[in-house]
Amino acid sequence: MDGLVAHRRAQDAFARVLADVTDTMLDETTPCEGWRVRDVIHHVIGGNARVAGEPGPVGASADDLRGAHAASAHAAASAFAAPDGLTRTFDAPLGAIPGAIFIRLRITDALTHAWDVATATGRSTSDLDPDLAAAMLDFARGLMRPELRGPGRAFAAEQPCPDDASAVDRLAAFLGRRPAALG
């Protein structure tokens, strides 16, 4: 799957979930331990801003956050689409990595956090790009290392999830979330 297209699809999925978020939902808890909806949104905006090498615009209201996400997603897409965007080295939370890997981390991040926000706000996750979720699950399985999991680390332990669950539920469970329907 083309990385630039996949990045746009993941950012679009996040934007669709964000479109339904109201100001009263911003303080709802999410499947990300210790994070509220606003924290997850700020994280995605900040990750996009990191790609672009710009400070991430943030805001207090859901409308402000939708605008900030759109601007940051566009800036990240432009940075990855630059002539060296997929070959240059980026300073990422997991260390210095090439753009071709960083874009896949950003895709996985945006799609998984779309699941987090949708789950926290009672929105269905079934329409969160199943083909993209399956591809990012394969990517995440190839990338994950034991030192990335556990308390105080980037990911919680993998959670149980049936093989016939949706691809996005399996991705979320692999990255440490407990799909609500599975208990």
Image (cartoon, grey):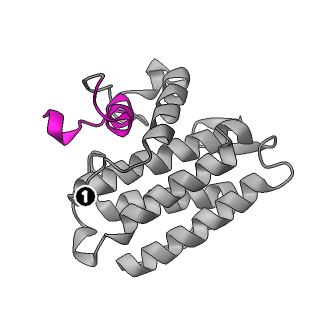
* Residue found 77% across the figure and 55% down from its top: 81
* Highlighted magenta segment, given as a residue range: 164-183
Q: Is residue 169 above or below residue 29?
A: above
* Residue found 73% across the figure and 61% down from its top: 78
Q: Is residue 107 left or right of residue 16?
A: right
Q: Position of residue 109 (x, y in %)?
A: 49, 46
Give the quarter of the image for residue 65: bottom left
Q: Is residue 165 left or right of residue 2?
A: left
* Residue found 78% across the figure and 49% down from its top: 85
Give the quarter of the image for residue 158: top left
Q: Is residue 59 above or below residue 142?
A: below
Which residue sits furthest right?
A: 83
Mark 1 crowdedness (10 Å alpha carbons): few <14, some 14-19, many ≥20: some
Callout 1 amino acid? Arg
Q: Is residue 47 above or below residue 54?
A: above
Q: Is residue 140 visible?
A: yes
Q: Position of residue 71 (x, y in %)?
A: 59, 72
Tell me if residue 70 is in the magenta stretch.
Answer: no
Q: Position of residue 84 (x, y in %)?
A: 85, 48
Marker count (numbered): 1
Q: Is residue 159 left or right of residue 154?
A: left
Q: Which residue is mark 1?
A: 123
Q: Position of residue 2 (x, y in %)?
A: 68, 42
- Out of 175 and 11, give the one closest to the viewer: 11
* Residue found 59% across the figure and 66% down from its top: 72
